[in-house]
Image: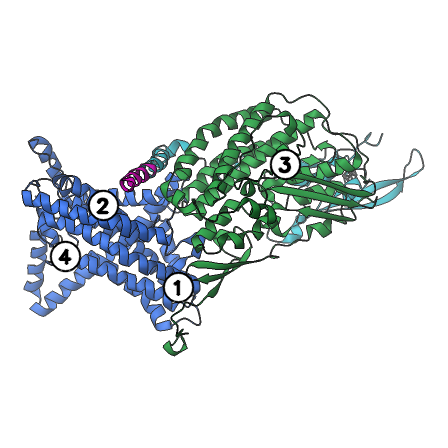
Chain colours: A cyan, B blue, C green
């Protein structure tokens, strides 16, 4: 007798499974969660903490906050950051002072671990939300973060 | 109304009037072949697209939506891609059998399509053993799968092919017996007779409970015959990669792929013809007005509507159920479906004997 | 092959043959290579061949600072990233002898339980796929997406979080965090029963899993199996219960134990664990205490000489991080005990005598993440 009972129970479980998928099929219009990516570019907003790439914000006078202290370079686990720095004589105090020449960032090696951002004492760098990082030539992934001609913002070092 | 017999005969007469008899026949055959090949291609394109769209909706996705509005040209693009693809095969394959196998599958599918009545008089070949012919042809298709798996010289393909052999031999029985149950009702193996004897009620209503049981067995075994989930052991991508067609690519793969879908159509069409009256409209005794309205819908729509419903059902299975294991598959057939089928035939024979089916 | 070339066995016995499963195979979920010895469809022997995704993370740690090591562990068992991070953080904190604030403990616990949920969801989708039901995968990903959004909002990443740092957390939680988690729990409580209807109760799935690949309690212990796989055999090995860390001592939850140890039992344990995880999160989400997010540590962390070990319960089992320090800023040697590696060793024992399809189902219930096995 359990032979027939098994058949009945089996069919019932199969039908209840079909009911679930059937329900979704009928409500597919409402339930579909697919985001159509290249089309929704305009409305697509990543979360504010999203880690896409390291950038160095500049203000309107082309000034940044990076002192060239190299803390980020040391913090980076895979050498994605290279700081090229130099010293120059400060006019006011007359002392030699470190300044940044190039803040080189290798996006191709970066693991977006955020350690450099945390390490930076002056909050000179931050994570950008941009995630479309694909390029045709990988040299384009090596970036200089400080813009040409930019200089240190006043009052950062105090 | 909507009788195609006159039209077909008219074309035939016209051909004979302008050509000598032999040439007229040949032209007629070529026309029929072209019509079927066209249908075959369209079926492939439409069914693959339908499968992908339906699967997408079951899975809360959008499905193909890039090429053409709602992605309707997706399968056309796929077909072009498959045609242009370089045929990559194995070096150590038995090249004659390896190349032959896809044709086996696709020709078997085409042949069984030839006996299906699409509407009154719209037939390629109204052979008197039509049902038998379809069963015979579908077993030929297995040969292709077995050959392909064996000749590819790949262990995964071989495993898939061997599974397919065991599966087909067993499920052929169930398909055959459930069809026989219906043949008992109609008393004929000719497709047009089967359809004609359902002009008042469809067999699924006439045959009472045995017909329902036969239908259930038929749809289960039919799904197994077409190698679709939950019976897709021959492909079983999580176990065998791609099963018997692992080593096929390009056009030859397309043949296997297409024939799977056409086989699904044939199974659904057989189901529609045997259980749901083929192209016969739905009639309810006593409701003359209703019956007239139903008669108004052309039979070709009835036929394809029923077929679409059954195809949808088979797709629904696929996108819900997990796959069986090979021994469970055989257990299901030999321990459950076959005894039930035999008992069911007896029951049906009894009903026919007592004349309860009218 | 010509007929003469066929090996004809005069005794009519069957020949065993080898088949390569992987490194590219849909059921190994990554670059794991299994060398199967089959007799027809029956598995006679399974040899695992590792190393296809070996990145020598243990060696890399010897050149990294302790802060940097944490982000490497994201890349081992990427589905349990938070748990791996936590193990390293706790080990380093042990060495530094600092105690993180209650707030950090609670947030860490919520995060790890969310990770467990998301990992189990993915596993559920995948076990469906391995047994042939493709739709489960999409449904699981729909629910997992909500957790990923929670992670992305608070941690800034979806998979490789690096949110736990030695001494606390990288940031405080996002203001939306609590609301989102509560929304998710509410949503998932309606969806989890559907998981049962689709797979757990399904007669085909039951037949595929019940009584297959039975792992006895003794074998589970001797093979070093941990996690849901061992608990299904009745081994009490839940570290959250046995050696509570973070905030697990202040929440009330059940350790899910099975008795039969078959494939279905392992499946059931994981499904029930999802309920327990939700229960844990519910207890904590409204009572996140105030407190410091990050304890003060030196700019360069140096651990005292010695050995520091911390193990945590990941979604797959026991994960251990062992630091041997010689007082420098990088460890002298670091060893990770990954659950997948020991769990993989039992596959040969379990799959023997079963069919290929069963092997796939058994593997699916152990939920292997190959980078975790290879490191
Ligand atoms: S995010 Fe991490 S890997 Fe990338 S540059 Fe910063 S420290 Fe280096
Ligand atoms: S970005 Fe920050 S940490 Fe890096 S060199 Fe500039 S100031 Fe120093």
Q: In the rendered structure, find residue B130 and report the number of the disc placed on it.
A: 4
Looking at the magenta stretch, what is its main secondary structure? helix
Mark 2 and mark 1 lie on one chain; the one further toward the N terminus is 1
Q: Is residue A67 above or below residue B237?
A: above
Q: Work out whether residue A113 or residue B73 is closer to the camera in this orientation and state it.
A: A113
Q: Nearer the viewer, mark 2 or mark 1?
A: 1
Q: Is mark 2 within 8 Å of ligand 1?
A: no
Which is nearer the eye, B64 or A150? B64
Q: Chain of mark 1?
A: B
Q: Secondary structure at mark 2?
A: helix
Residue A2 drawn in magenta: yes
Q: Please give the residue where the numbered disc 2 appears in the rendered image.
A: B307
Label 3, on which residue?
Answer: C239
Q: Based on the displayed image, in which of its 4 quarters is residue B59 positioned?
A: top left
Give the Cα distance between marks 2 and 1.
33 Å
**Which comes before the other along the chain, label 4 or label 2?**
4
Instruction: Give the CA distance from mark 4 to mark 2.
Output: 18 Å
Left of B104 or right of it: where is A107? right
Write down the region rendered in magenta: A1-13
- The spot of residue A1 in percent (x, y) is 27, 40
């Amino acid at each position: 007798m359990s032979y027939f009972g098994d058949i009945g129970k089996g069919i019932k479980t199969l039908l209840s499974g079909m009911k679930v998928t059937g329900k979704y099929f009928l409500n597919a219009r409402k339930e579909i969660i697919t985001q159509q990516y290249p089309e929704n570019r305009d409305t697509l907003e990543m979360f504010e903490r999203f880690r896409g790439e390291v950038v160095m914000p500049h203000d309107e006078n082309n000034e940044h906050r990076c002192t060239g202290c190299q803390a980020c370079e040391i913090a980076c686990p895979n050498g994605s950051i290279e700081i090229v720095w130099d010293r120059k004589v400060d006019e006011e105090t007359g002392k030699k002072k470190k300044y940044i020449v190039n803040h080189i960032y290798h996006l191709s090696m970066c693991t977006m671990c955020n350690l450099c951002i945390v390490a930076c004492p002056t909050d000179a760098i931050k994570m950008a939300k941009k995630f479309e990082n694909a390029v045709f030539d990988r040299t384009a992934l090596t970036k200089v973060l400080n813009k040409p001609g930019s200089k240190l913002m006043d009052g950062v070092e105090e | 109304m909507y009788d195609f017999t006159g039209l077909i005969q008219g074309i035939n007469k016209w051909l004979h009037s302008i050509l000598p008899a032999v040439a007229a026949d040949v032209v007629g055959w070529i026309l029929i072949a072209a019509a079927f090949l066209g249908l075959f291609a369209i079926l492939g394109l439409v069914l693959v697209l339908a499968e992908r769209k339906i699967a997408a909706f079951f899975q809360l996705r959008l499905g193909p939506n890039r090429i053409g509005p709602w992605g309707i040209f997706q399968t056309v693009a796929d077909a072009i891609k498959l045609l242009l693809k370089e045929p990559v095969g194995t070096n150590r394959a038995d090249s004659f059998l390896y190349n032959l196998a896809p044709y086996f599958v696709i020709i078997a599918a085409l042949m069984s399509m030839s006996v299906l009545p699409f509407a009154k008089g719209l037939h390629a070949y109204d052979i008197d053993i039509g049902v038998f012919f379809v069963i015979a042809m579908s077993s030929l298709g297995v040969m292709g799968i077995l050959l392909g798996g064996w000749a590819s010289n790949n262990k995964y393909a071989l495993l898939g092919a061997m599974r397919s052999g065991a599966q087909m031999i067993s499920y052929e029985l169930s398909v055959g017996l459930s069809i026989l149950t219906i043949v008992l009702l109609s008393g004929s193996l000719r497709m047009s007779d089967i359809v004609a004897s359902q002009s008042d009620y469809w067999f699924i209503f006439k045959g009472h409970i045995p017909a329902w049981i036969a239908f259930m067995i038929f749809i289960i075994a039919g799904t197994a015959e077409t190698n679709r989930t939950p019976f897709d052991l021959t492909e079983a991508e999580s176990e065998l990669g791609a099963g018997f067609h692992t080593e096929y690519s390009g056009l030859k793969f397309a043949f296997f792929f297409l024939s799977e879908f056409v086989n699904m159509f044939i199974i659904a069409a057989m189901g529609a013809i045997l259980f749901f009256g083929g192209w016969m409209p739905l009639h309810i005794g006593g409701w003359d007005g209703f019956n007239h309205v139903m008669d108004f819908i052309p039979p070709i729509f009835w036929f394809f509507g029923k077929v679409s419903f059954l195809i949808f059902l088979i797709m629904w299975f696929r996108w819900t159920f997990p796959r069986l294991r090979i021994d469970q598959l055989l257990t299901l057939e030999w321990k459950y479906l076959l005894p039930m089928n035999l008992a069911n035939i007896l029951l049906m024979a009894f009903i026919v004997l007592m004349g309860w089916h009218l | 092959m010509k007929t003469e070339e066929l090996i004809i066995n005069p005794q009519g016995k069957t020949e065993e043959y080898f088949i390569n499963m992987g490194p590219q195979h849909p059921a190994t979920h990554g670059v794991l290579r299994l060398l199967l010895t089959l007799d027809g469809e029956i598995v006679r022997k399974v040899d695992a061949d590792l190393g296809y995704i070996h990145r020598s993370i243990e060696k890399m740690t010897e050149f990294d600072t302790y802060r940097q090591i944490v982000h490497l562990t994201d890349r081992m068992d990427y589905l349990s990233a938070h748990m791996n991070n936590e193990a390293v953080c706790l080990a380093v904190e042990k060495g530094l002898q600092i105690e993180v604030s209650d707030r950090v403990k609670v947030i860490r616990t919520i995060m790890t339980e969310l990770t467990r949920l998301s990992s189990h969801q993915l596993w559920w989708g995948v076990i469906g796929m391995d047994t042939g039901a493709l739709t489960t995968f999409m449904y699981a990903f729909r629910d997992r997406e909500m957790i990923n959004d929670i992670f992305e909002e608070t941690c800034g990443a979806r998979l490789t979080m690096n949110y736990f740092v030695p001494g606390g957390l990288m940031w405080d939680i996002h203001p939306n965090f609590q609301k989102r988690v509560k929304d998710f729990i509410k949503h998932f409580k309606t969806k989890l029963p559907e998981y049962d209807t689709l797979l757990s109760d399904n007669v085909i799935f039951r037949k595929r899993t019940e009584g297959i690949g039975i792992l006895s309690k003794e074998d589970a212990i001797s093979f070093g199996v941990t996690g849901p796989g061992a608990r299904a055999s009745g081994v009490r090995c839940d570290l959250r219960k046995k050696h509570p860390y973070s905030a697990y001592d202040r929440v009330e939850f059940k350790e899910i134990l099975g008795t039969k140890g078959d494939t279905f039992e392992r499946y059931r344990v994981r499904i029930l664990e999802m309920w327990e995880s939700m229960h844990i999160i519910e207890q904590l989400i409204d009572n996140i205490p105030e407190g410091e997010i990050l304890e003060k540590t030196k700019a360069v962390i140096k651990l005292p000489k010695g050995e520091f070990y911390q193990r945590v319960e990941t979604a797959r089992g026991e994960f251990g991080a062992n630091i041997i320090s010689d007082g420098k800023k990088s460890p002298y040697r670091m060893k990770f005990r990954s659950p997948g590696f020991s769990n993989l060793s039992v596959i040969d024992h379990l799959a023997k005598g079963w069919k290929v399809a069963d092997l796939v189902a058994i593997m699916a219930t152990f939920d292997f993440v190959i980078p975790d096995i290879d490191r």
